[in-house]
Image (cartoon, rainbow, N blue to C red):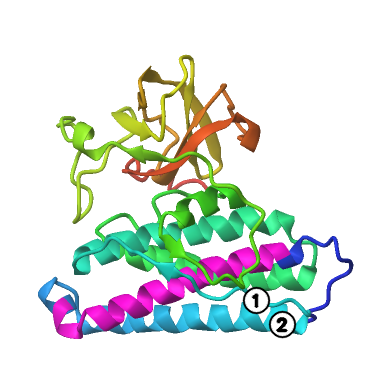
Amino acid sequence: MNCSFDSPDNIDPTVLQFALTLEHLENVFYKGALSKFSPRDFTKAGYNADYYTNLQYIAHDEEQHVKLLSGALTAAGVTPVQACTYSFPYTDVQSFITLSSVLEGVGTSAYLGGAPLITSKDYLSVAGAILVSEALHTSLQRGAAGEVPFANPYGTALDPTSVYTLAAGFIKSCPSSNPALPFKPFPTLSVAMKSNKKHSGWKKHSKSAPIPCAGDKVEFTAASAIPDGSYVTFVSGLSVVSVKGESKGNSTTAAIPQVAEGQTYVFVSNKDVEGKLDDSAILFGPAILEVAPQPPTYDPNQQ
């Protein structure tokens, strides 16, 4: 792997530093959980020894990703960022697995969304190799959480600022020596779970909580008041669809579009951004919403 940069203005160091920031988070996340929970804890929660071994493999993978990215940056004359101090809101095995499936999904989306920014073919190949690993982790953890492991025919790309917005929620502090990343988090948006519990139509598609389907209405809570006329924009797979929100104060409600399946990213936008979402349109977000996929269909006669 060639670790040189073509010019000081090359964006590749920033992309690698950002990827390393995410890998540090995942590395600490898995090692912390494996230190906190014993194999017996997973057995009591209904998981076998093979699953625990697979978690150890994931922890191994994340450590290798950290070493690879750190080494590439060092070889290029760039000081790699160090791990931060994190806070992960899991309390038991099941909540750890649920959070893991979400984090792995975000990691996969981050590599997919960041790939077009990379200028070096060598780095792009490495990013693609890590993306495959993250996607495998995602499928394993989604299955463990009782969700469809591959609920969408396509991966969902997420831009660096949106990924950083989500990651920042787990970061308590970072070493002062870490260079600042050129991202400013968007104002936050979350799924209003307490309000959504009244929607009895939500079905229990996972071990952890009921999951909505396309067509169900979902309420979201923003960091501040949502302007009248705002849209709720759903990003899922290759689809970006805006729906007019029913807003009041810092809450808004919208029906899930038919194209949303699996881990979906939701934003409040200032306009209908059908097909493409850019930073200038984002008011709040992203929130992460798991959407139950449609029943699988296929034509056995189509070759």
Q: Amino acid at mark 2?
A: Thr
Tell me whether circle 2 and circle 1 mark residues in contact (CB < 8 Å).
yes
**Residue positioned 27% across, 66% down in the render:** 96
Mark 1, Cα crowd under 10 Å, few <14 / some 14-19 / many 20+, is many
Q: Which sits in the foreground, 143 or 172?
A: 172
Number of residues whose C-alpha sits closer than 10 Å to that of mark 2, classed few (under 14), some (14–19) or many (20 or more): few
Image check: 205 left or right of 59? left
Q: Is residue 122 left or right of residue 238?
A: right
- Where is residue 282 shown, x and y percent of the image? 56, 33
Query: What residue does disc 2 label?
Result: 74
Please identify the dominant SS of the magenta region: helix
Name the secondary structure under disc 1: loop
Seen in the picture, residue 207 relative to 262 is either above or below; the reply is below
Say whether residue 157 is visible. Answer: yes
Q: Which quadrant of the view contains residue 131?
A: bottom right
Q: CA–CA distance between discs 2 and 1? A: 7 Å
Image height of 260 relative to 232, above or below: below
Segment tinted magenta in the rendering? 14-41
Say the numbered circle drawn on residue 291. none
Q: What residue is at 35 percent from the left and 83 percent from the top?
A: 56
The residue shown at (67%, 58%) is 115
Position of the N terminus by quadrant? bottom right
Which residue position is annotated with label 1? 80
Q: Does 128 appear above or below 218? A: below
**For this rendering, which residue is in front, 114 or 195?**
195
In the image, is residue 23 part of the stretch drawn in magenta?
Answer: yes
